[in-house]
Amino acid sequence: MATISVDPSRIDALLTRVRREVDDGLLPAAQVAVAIDGEIVVDATFGAAEATRFIPYSATKALTVAAIWRLIGDAGLDVSRPVASYLPSFGENGKDGVTIEQVLLHTGGFPMAPLGPSQWRTHADRCAAYADWQLEFPPGERYVYHPVSAHWVLCDIIEEVTGDDYREVIQRLVTDPLGLPRLLGIPLDEQDDIAEVVGVGEAASIDELAAAFGDQVRDQQPIPTEIVLWALTSLNHPKARAQGVPGGGAVVHAADLAMLYQGLLHNPGGLWDPQVLADGTGHVRSMLPDPSGVPASRTLGLVVAGDDGFSALRGFGTVNSPRAFGHNGAGGQLAFADPATGLSGCYVTSGLDQNLVREFRRNTEIADAMLAVAP
């Protein structure tokens, strides 16, 4: 039972906004959680049972980097070193100079490098695949979001440093100490409560996209929506959920990620080296622009809202402090914390909206409503 005093009208406003698309029949289900000073103050599910778990897509990345941060502080992992110094096969095809820092900043140069179910099962299989990967641009020169590839590499570095399965390491170093359940790699017999992900809505026109995000989007060559949707819904497969894709395949209740971010805010028991944690949650190492021109504002694994007017485009809404940090996910998933208020929040849905303009507006309104809950 929450003991923190919050304004009930602000909670009502948040829940009303979250349930709107579910009530309207656009989204099949949605879930929201807000935590303040180590305590859950909002936890609600619409369109599904309260215990339902969701795939948060790239909000998963916070789990992987939180384990990397533990290894930087506790095991001497050096992010300035080339990936190939830990994973020799990665150095093939001119990738020998790619550093771990560049991988964490999405400047490694291999954003769309392929790794599918036939290759991702074991450490040896993945390392064999890395040898075939090609660079798409010189490492460090550009920021291009690596949806999946970078975090496979990070997890194999975790395995090389610890000698253990990356899923077990993440549980041991991150979720268990925070009192959270297993979030990555869900056994086949424990998947009955996971929401099936579906595509919803129609894609926005190029004119709608340009009106919302600027004319520069006309010059981009996005991946066709049907290919994106196919890739995202592939995580419905029980074997994919059991594998635990480290860049996007966690399975969570919204409260789990809200409490993960409470851990990153408060560092209970000194779980992370304080300097490493401050670096990961607050030190912006890259402001290289993304293909649409928005500066990346990337730390060593996460995103910082910043004070340059692009906070909403980074998934934080408009009323957060510049120090807010987090990582959102495809289809409108939100997860972040704001050190100014001690608040963290997570919103997840099983409906992947194909209209990116509507998704952006919904994200902004829900993020603002979550942030407004803070006393």
Image: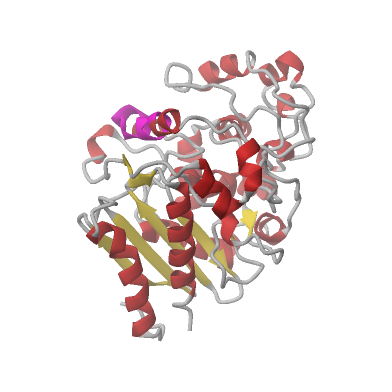
Q: Give the color scheme: rainbow, by chain, secondary structure or one colour.
A: secondary structure
x and y, in percent, of residue 92 in the image: 71, 15
Residue 116 placement (x, y as % from top left): 46, 21
Does any portion of residue 23 appear in the rendered image?
A: yes
Q: Nearer the viewer, residue 2 or 111?
A: 111
Q: Which residue occupies the foreground of this view, 189 or 105?
A: 105
The image shows residue 103 at horizontal and vertical percentages of 68, 36
**Can residue 268 be seen at all in this image of the molecule?**
no
Q: Is residue 300 above or below residue 263?
A: above
Q: Is residue 126 above or below residue 62?
A: above
Q: Magenta part of the protein: which range? A: 230-240
Q: Residue at x 59, y 46 (%)?
A: 65
Front residue of 92/134: it is: 134
- Position in image of residue 266 (x %, y %): 57, 68
Position of 1 with respect to 218 (left or right) is left
Q: What residue appears at the point 38 percent right and 54 percent down from the top-left corner? A: 348
Image quarter of residue 32? bottom left
Q: Is residue 120 above or below residue 259?
A: above
Q: How many marks?
A: 0
Task: In the rendered view, tell whether residue 238 sits above or below residue 77.
Answer: above
185 left or right of 262? left
Q: Main secondary structure of the magenta part?
A: helix
